[in-house]
């Protein structure tokens, strides 16, 4: 029903995991600066950059960031060897990050952060100098893809291929200006309207021909992704729309040894879902209904008020639950689940979203019970550390010689990308294990299976 099978003929699956496991990569050191390029410099981006600047100055702590705070166990539990992840693998230091990006609005990062209204003014004022220096480059934008907003900071009218060339020139100039030895790009722009992969997305040749001919199925985010991959820059997609999850761009990323990842940051309500649903399933408790509704009033909420953009978000939010519960394996528990997701634009709340979940569950002998969640969250506060971790890990992946889809970063996404024919793993605890085992593998350490029998022999 949802493709929970491997396809043996798939190109992505052609390397056996055993042969891959035998040869840990040669990790290149994180020498020099890492430039972070971000299409979309709104609430999430400014909260991320301001946060990094505050942490660098010792004003704040990197709460929520696995790369900065988490440890990783090595060897047996009795070995007591749990270094911090950033001491275990060579990650770029926060002091070596340089920021740049694009937006349809001209405001610098300080003004955009004030406008986003996520961080308090006294904090922003302490960071005014570094934030004011970051000014968005003119954007590649198409109002067919993002409908509710209009801004003046656009590239001149041109073909989609010309726009890709202009972005590549921006990337080249940013590299030179910032002195960065490596770059990573992460989409934090608005959610584009829902599109399925079309004929033009099937091969790189089709795609490049489509860029020349202005094919309407090629979105602005795909033009950024094309420019990034062609420039050898890893690309991650923080929004739910179609970008690098199209065969042409996946092929290009593999051929050019560029890591890609996506999609849609796993933050508020879906984060809660991926915590709770695996727990219910682990105890074989049934779910008959899951109703999720949100109010939010930031610009993201305004864009998502458009049905086309909402559809992108809805698809991404709906898929997680079905994949976790696997109704085809547990029909008596999940076959008849009614799952509904609503997002309501409600300006008074700004970025302080509220998400309600009503979960109808059933237990022993079918007796019904209910769970209610009221998550008063802050969207961009939850997303900012994910942006940091993703750019640092994407850069690490590139230095490890990893290319194409980075499934080990599924931990961060609502709709994780996988190889063709593979179903995505949505359970956040399995995702975390996968992430940490990938780091162990990179360093030639033993993987941890959690079997534990050796302690009882
Ligand atoms: N917790 C979260 O905040 C969260 C979780 C999951 C996904 N996301 C996604 O992250 C993205 C950013 O969220 P946000 O709250 O910062 O939104 P935002 O509206 O504050 O910022 C998005 C910015 O992108 C700009 N933009 C739109 N199209 C562009 C283009 N083609 N080129 C350059 N800039 C463009 C807009 O002008 C805007 O400033 C959204 O797509 C959102 O759905 C956010």
Image: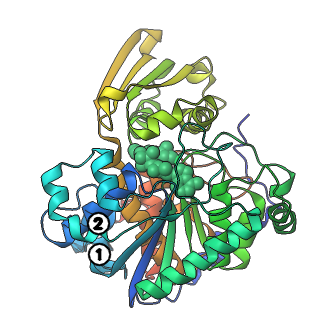
Identify the disc placed on residue 94. Answer: 1
Q: Is residue 252 visible?
A: yes
**Disc 2 packing (10 Å; few <14; some 14–19; many ≥20):** many
Dot in front, 1 or 2: 2
Q: Mark 1 or mark 2: name the one nearer the start of the chain.
A: 1
The residue sitting at 46% across, 54% down in the picture is 105
The residue sitting at 62% across, 64% down in the picture is 224
Can you give x and y, in whole percent of width and height, for residue 399 in the image?
A: 50, 83
Identify the disc placed on residue 131. Answer: 2
Marks 1 and 2 close (CB-CB < 8 Å): no
Q: Is residue 14 visible?
A: no
Q: Which residue is at the front of the view, 58 or 72?
A: 58
Can you give x and y, in whole percent of width and height, for residue 428 in the image?
A: 43, 48
Q: Quadrant of the N terminus?
A: top right
SS class, disc 1: helix
Can you give x and y, in whole percent of width and height, for residue 119 in the image?
A: 23, 49
The residue sitting at 20% across, 67% down in the picture is 55
Can you give x and y, in whole percent of width and height, for residue 450 in the image?
A: 39, 59
Q: Quadrant of the C terminus?
A: bottom left
Question: In the image, 307: left or right of 43?
Answer: right
């Amino acid at each position: 029903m949802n493709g929970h099978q491997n396809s043996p003929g798939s190109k992505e699956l052609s390397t056996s995991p055993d042969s891959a496991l035998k040869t840990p990569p040669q990790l290149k050191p994180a020498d020099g600066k890492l430039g972070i390029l971000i299409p979309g410099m709104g609430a999430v981006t400014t909260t991320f950059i301001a946060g990094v600047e505050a942490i660098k100055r010792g004003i704040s702590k990197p709460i929520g960031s696995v790369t900065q705070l988490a440890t990783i166990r090595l060897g047996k539990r009795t070995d007591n060897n749990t270094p911090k992840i950033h001491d275990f693998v060579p990650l770029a230091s926060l002091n070596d990050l340089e920021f740049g990006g694009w937006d349809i609005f001209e405001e610098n990062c300080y003004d955009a952060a004030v406008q986003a209204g996520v961080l308090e003014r006294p904090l922003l004022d302490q960071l005014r100098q570094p934030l004011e220096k970051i000014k968005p480059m003119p954007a590649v934008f198409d109002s067919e893809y993002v409908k509710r907003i209009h801004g003046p900071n656009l590239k001149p009218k041109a073909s989609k291929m010309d726009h890709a060339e202009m972005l590549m020139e921006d990337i080249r100039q940013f590299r030179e200006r910032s002195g960065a030895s490596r770059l990573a790009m992460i989409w934090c722009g608005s959610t584009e309207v829902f599109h399925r992969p079309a004929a033009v997305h099937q091969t790189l040749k089709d795609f490049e021909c489509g860029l020349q001919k202005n094919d309407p199925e090629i979105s602005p985010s795909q033009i950024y992704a094309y420019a990034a991959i062609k420039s050898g820059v890893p690309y991650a997609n923080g929004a739910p729309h179609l970008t690098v999850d199209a065969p042409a761009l996946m092929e290009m990323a593999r051929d050019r040894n560029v890591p890609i990842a996506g999609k849609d940051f796993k933050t508020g309500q879906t984060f809660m879902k991926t915590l709770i649903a695996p727990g219910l399933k682990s105890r074989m408790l049934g779910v008959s209904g899951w109703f999720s509704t949100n109010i939010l009033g930031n610009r993201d909420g305004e864009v998502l008020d458009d049905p086309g953009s909402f559809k992108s978000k809805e698809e991404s939010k709906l898929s997680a639950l079905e994949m976790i519960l696997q109704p085809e394996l547990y029909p008596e528990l999940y076959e008849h689940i009614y799952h509904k997701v609503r997002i309501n634009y409600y300006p008074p709340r700004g970025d302080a979203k509220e998400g309600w979940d009503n979960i109808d569950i059933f237990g022993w002998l079918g007796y019904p019970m209910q769970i209610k969640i009221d998550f008063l969250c802050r969207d961009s506060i939850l997303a900012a550390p994910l942006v940091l971790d993703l750019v640092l890990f994407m850069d690490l992946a590139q230095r490890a010689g990893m290319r194409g889809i980075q499934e080990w970063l599924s931990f961060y996404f609502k709709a994780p990308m996988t190889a063709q024919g593979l179903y995505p793993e949505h359970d956040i605890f399995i995702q975390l294990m996968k992430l940490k085992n990938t780091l162990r593998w990179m360093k030639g350490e033993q993987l941890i299976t959690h079997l534990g029998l050796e302690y009882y022999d």
